[in-house]
Image (cartoon, helix red, strand yellow):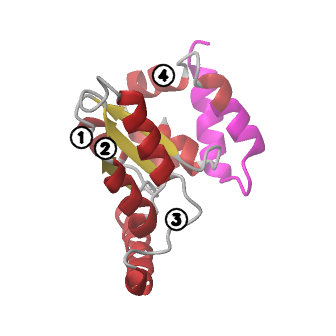
Amino acid sequence: MSALLLHLRAVDFVVGGCGTGIGYLNSVMQYPGVFCGHLLTPLDAFLFARINAGNCVSLALNQGYGWAGDVNLRLIFDALFTPETGTGYPPHRAEPQRQGRELLAQISRAAHRSMAEILLALPAEVTRTALNYPAFRPVLQSAVATAPNPDPTLTSVIEHLLESAPA
């Protein structure tokens, strides 16, 4: 779901997570064009935003969200959503870090199938469940209808999967 919305450019960034954050991270990183960080602290968020400048983060939701958890989350988001995204840290490492991000994007494109191929290869029960999740289906339909530079193959696959699944 996260990767599909990122791919369709329906969202610029996804915040997800699970108990340890590792399960969500492993899951979402299976898809092309997803660059996810695992954040435990505000320092992780600070460095991820500046160095990795990814489009997704995974939070360990069973750690650090008890007493003053709201403060921890606010500090993480303040450090993560900064105008300094991608500027590098320390500043003199900005150019090699930018080159590294570009190389990872090239590797992702080379190492993954297209999103349409992935959707067609997944078991029907997976796509049916995900695409028809009540809060997701209307977002997906809107994303397909308004996607900038839509991939006609992907659009066709999504429309077919939505039509073939019970609403």
| Distance from the alpha carbon under mark 2 to that under mark 4 | 22 Å
| Distance from the alpha carbon under mark 3 to that under mark 1 | 23 Å
Instruction: Return the residue found at the far top.
Output: 166
Q: In the structure shown, which secondary structural element does the residue marked by tag 4 occupy?
A: helix
Residue tagged by mark 1? 22
Give the magenta part as a residue range.
Answer: 140-167
In the rendering, which numbered label is found on residue 65? none
Q: Are marks 1 and 2 in contact (CB under 8 Å)?
A: yes
Q: Position of residue 12 (x, y in %)?
A: 59, 50
Q: Amino acid at mark 3?
A: Thr
Above or below for 124 versus 35? above
Residue tagged by mark 3? 85
Decide whether residue 29 is among the magenta residues: no
Closer to the camera: disc 2 or disc 3?
Answer: 3
Residue tagged by mark 4? 128
Name the residue at 41% across, 72% down. 101
The reply to whether residue 3 is visible in this rendering is no
First along the sequence among labels 4 and 1: 1
Task: Answer with left or right where residue 74 lies relative to residue 37.
Answer: right
Residue tagged by mark 2? 25
First along the sequence among labels 2 and 4: 2
Q: Amino acid at mark 4?
A: Arg
Count residues near mark 1 (Cα–Cα under 10 Å), then give few for <14, some for 14-19, many for 20+: some
Q: In the structure shown, which secondary structural element does the residue marked by tag 2 occupy?
A: helix
| Distance from the alpha carbon under mark 2 to that under mark 3 | 20 Å
| Distance from the alpha carbon under mark 1 to that under mark 2 | 5 Å
Residue in the foreground of this view, choosing between 133 and 40 = 40
First along the sequence among labels 2 and 3: 2
Count residues near mark 4 (Cα–Cα under 10 Å), then give few for <14, some for 14-19, many for 20+: some
| Distance from the alpha carbon under mark 4 to that under mark 3 | 36 Å
